[in-house]
Image (cartoon, rainbow, N blue to C red):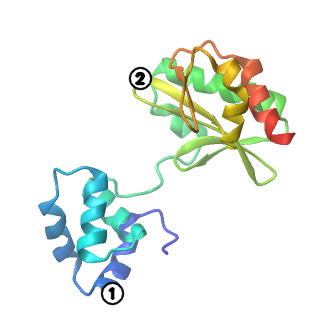
Amino acid sequence: MPSSPDRASYFPAIEKRYGKPMSYWFTQMKKVKGEKYADQMAFLQEQHGFSRAHANALVLYSKGNTSSRRYETFDDYLKTLDETKAKTMRTIFATLTAKFKKAEVVIAWNQPMLKQDGRYLFGAGAQKEHILIAPFDADIIDEFRPRLEGYHVNKKTIRVPADWKVDKKLLVDLVSAQFD
């Protein structure tokens, strides 16, 4: 698997494994251009025997997403957000780094994450209308359900408003629970 975040770095392996030049695969992708991501993935995997990694690289490249890396730092991530979301994200991570002194904010999966001693503890991501927060151990959400009333809770994430008045105690408790 290529170590480069550039999706085109998969192309030599795709050509070798599936026996056709990339021009052929780009033509194939034009056949499913208007389809959803999952349908395009299925087309490559089911019709052409692509591995998931190769299909993902080609589908996303064809959609104009040529690199898997978009942000080098938390500040890079914040620059892409409107002022309200950036302020909320800053407050979330400032709250956590103030409490967990050894922890650092890193970018993983193109999202800001709190990491300590090589272990991911918490992540957050700004969406179009809201912010998703998540302890890295999704089982903790079930433990905290009584305290999450009023929030939209998914299986692994908690949706908060973009202008959330950050519940600092909740954040600290969500992360602290992973040390119990």
Q: Mark 2 sits on what residue?
A: 129
Query: As drawn, is 94 to the left or to the right of 56?
Result: right
* Amino acid type of the residue that numbered disc 2 sits on in the rendered structure: Glu
Q: Badge 1, how many Cα within 10 Å: few under 14, some, many 20+?
A: few
Classify residue 74 as left or right of residue 32. Answer: right
Residue at 37% in and 62% down: 56
Q: Is residue 55 visible?
A: yes
Circles 1 and 2 in contact, beta carbons < 8 Å: no
**The residue tagged with tag 1: helix, strand or loop?**
helix
- Quickly name the residue at label 1: 16
Q: Position of residue 125 (x, y in %)?
A: 53, 35
Disc 1/disc 2 C-alpha distance (Å): 43 Å
**At x 59% / y 44%, what residue is drawn?**
73
**Residue 13: image location, x then y, percent:** 38, 81
Q: Is residue 8 left or right of residue 73?
A: left
- Identified by mark 1, the residue type is Lys
Let me know if residue 102 appears in the view: no
Give the percent coordinates (x, y) of residue 115: 73, 46
Residue at the spot 27% in from the left edge and 69% down from the top edge: 44
Q: Quadrant of the C terminus?
A: top right
Tell me the quarter of the picture where residue 6 sits: bottom left
**Vertical order, 159 against 24 (above or below):** above
